[in-house]
Amino acid sequence: MNYPQLSNVQRLSGAFVADSPEGTFIFAYDQQNQPVQVGVMLKDYNAVKSGHDEALARLKEYYDRLVILGDIKPAPTPEELAQRQLAALERLEKFESALPALEAIADAFPRINAMLKEWDELNRPTSAAPAASIPDMVA
């Protein structure tokens, strides 16, 4: 690990604070008595945090502009998600209430096919030319 160029080192019990061009760091000693960075001073933390906060604010501004322009669609809010799920449940309930009627129709297909075949047999011309057959309905 590359340690910053240290100047103005202040020793504390088991730790020390060191100033460098990159900031003020807090070091402690590990088991091999080597310095390990364990923190930074509050002024350095606040400087980094303010830069981070500014970047987040600018990012939010760009995001809001893209939403207004319609280039991106915002993520749904929890309320919108709840409404979508409720609508899906209502559609499912409607389907479930129609299920017995759909099953009755599906059960009727074999009888309908048998009736169509019988109709075809009864209405078959007596001449040598075969009648056009009615295709079976899919069950």
Image: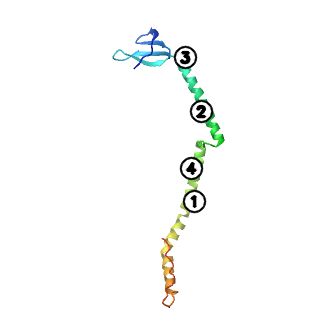
How would you rate the neighbour count of disc 3 (Cα within 10 Å): few for under 14, some for 14-19, many for 20 or more? few
Element type where label 2 sits in the image: helix
Q: What residue type is labelled 3?
A: Lys
Label 2: how many residues lie within 10 Å, few (<14), some (14-19) or many (20+)?
few
**Of labels 3 and 4, the one closer to you:** 3
| Image disc number at residue 94 | 1
What residue sits right under mark 3 in the picture? Answer: 43
Which residue bears the numbered disc 4?
85
Residue drawn at (58%, 28%) of the image: 55
Marks 2 and 4 sit apart, C-alpha to C-alpha, by 31 Å
Marks 4 and 1, how far apart in space?
14 Å
* Residue 9 place in picture, x, y as percent: 45, 9
Q: Identity of the amino acid at label 2?
A: Leu
Label 2 or label 4, whichever comes before in sequence order: 2
Label 3 close to label 1 by CB (< 8 Å)? no
* Residue type at tag 1: Lys
Foreground tag (2 vs 4): 2
Residue 104 higher or lower than 80, as above or below? below
